[in-house]
Amino acid sequence: MTTTTSVGPRYASQQVARLYFIGALALFVGQIVFGITLGLQYLIGDLFFPAIPFNIARMVHTNLLIVWLLMGFMGSAYYLIPEESETELHSPALAQALFWIFLGAGALTILGYLLVPYATLAAATGNDWLATMGREFLEQPLPTKLGIVVVALGFLYNISLTVLKGRKTAISLVLLTGLWGLALLFLFSFVNPSNLVRDKMYWWFVVHLWVEGVWELILGSLLAYLLIKTTGVDREVIDKWLYLIITFALVTGILGTGHHFYFIGLPGYWQWVGSVFSALEPIPFFMMTLFAFNMVQRRKREHPNQAAVLWTVGCAVMGFLGAGLWGFIHTLSPVNYYTHGSQVTAAHGHLAFYGAYVLVVIAMISYAMPILRGREANPRRAQSVEMWSFWVMSIGMAVMVLALTGAGILQVWLQRIPPTEGALGFMQTQDQLRFFYWVRVAGGVGFLAGLVMYLWSFFVGPATDEAPAAPATLARA
């Protein structure tokens, strides 16, 4: 064992990331609290009514998910880009100002949802002038959407100039491409045509091409960066993997959008295009799993931050299970005909977001925050708590996902497969799913406990002055 090493970030401007990481974790806690509230409202219909009706709690839950992940991506970019570019961030002051603007706009939007009837909020924020509200995940009032655009443009200006004046690497260029794609695709949220088919197409251009398109570029670049830092494997090897993964991600993700076009009025050939290419979407996620394990096995060093290694490898595995396997379960059109919009969809959504995007942000925070606090890695006790938090959160998520999968299968069996005269109504079916909903709540409480453990790990000090080390088996986990 070695003594604890005092280190810090290579570039002073990387400290900006700390604000974004703290803000993201705070919003993450809020998202989970509202998620458990929603789970209970499935079982206790008038819980918190009329103060927090179900539709408002759901908006808060999903909007907090998007905002804190975006904040996590921004923090990760502000930490990664100066190091990859070998130069200071173009404007740390701009990055700090944009953080407070983003946080303030997000907080005001959530308060608006909770304190003002949604129709009143729409009328007061210019929705009659430019209708952009009322669509799932894109419920934000017009001023908030405009604020997001301003923040995104300022953020992209900042990191783009940093990349342009410094070293160009595969990781920074792929990350920049993903972030620019994220911002440009969000512009479709301002298009709300009266034709329902076009409306759903543009909506999926934002939602699907984010999470199954450009976000995968962000995911791949962050994973590549973490694996370089924690394994010491040659950059050339990791770059080749990264290019291969993003090629498959873009080809399958863009054409795989067709699995959302099955039943919304578009030509029938989309059933073939969507089925074939979305069935191939697990490939890039499986490649990420192979990528992570292969790099860890070929590592040239035992990194002292074994918690970050665990989060990184866990991200690759859980991402494949959630976005890959659970997505494939119901992506073919003959299956999707029965499962579309059921609890099977909810199971896939929860595990995919957790595995692919929640875990990669936490992995970046786990790696970067100790360095931002002046040490290469957290003490052994803190890392032990952090590793336990990974397992508790992952088991809690697994319980939730299995419960939702069981609920979805039973929902299809009772409500959608029987002949019309033999099928149960929606609410009758929901009554039959209560056991699964209780299990889902238990999983959510377990997940929250794991998140609290993760936050607690930041305040756990060393038992001795020894450096945080981990058994070799953990390094190979």
Image (tube, rainbow, N blue to C red):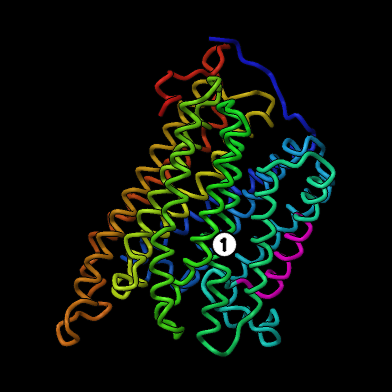
Task: Give percent across and percent down for residue 134.
Answer: 55, 78
Describe residue 422's horizontal placement relative to residue 431 as left or right.
left
Task: Give percent across and percent down for residue 188.
Answer: 63, 74
Find disc 1 in the rendering and name its residue.
Answer: 210
Vertical placement of 126 versus 280: above or below? below
Q: Identify the residue shown where x is 60% and y is 11%.
A: 3
Vertical placement of 362 versus 27: above or below? above
User: Is 426 within the magenta?
Assistant: no
Residue 60 visible? The answer is no
Q: Quadrant of residue 237?
A: top right
- Check the image and name the residue furthest to the bottom: 194
User: Is 143 within the magenta?
Assistant: yes
Q: Identify the residue shown where x is 68% and y is 70%.
A: 145
Pick whichever, 465 or 316, lies toward us: 316
- Extent of the magenta region: 140-155
Describe residue 393's horizontal placement relative to residue 429 as left or right.
right
Describe residue 322's horizontal placement relative to residue 245 as left or right.
left
In what quadrant of the picture does the C terminus appear?
top left
Judging from the image, what secondary structure is the residue with disc 1 in? helix
Q: How dense is the environment of label 1, judged by Cα within 10 Å: few (below 14), some, or many (20 and up)?
A: many
Task: Give percent across and percent down for residue 58.
Answer: 47, 67
Dominant secondary structure of the residues highlighted in magenta in the image: helix
Residue 258 visible? The answer is yes
Vertical placement of 455 versus 273: above or below? above
Q: Amino acid at mark 1?
A: Trp
The total number of labels drawn is 1
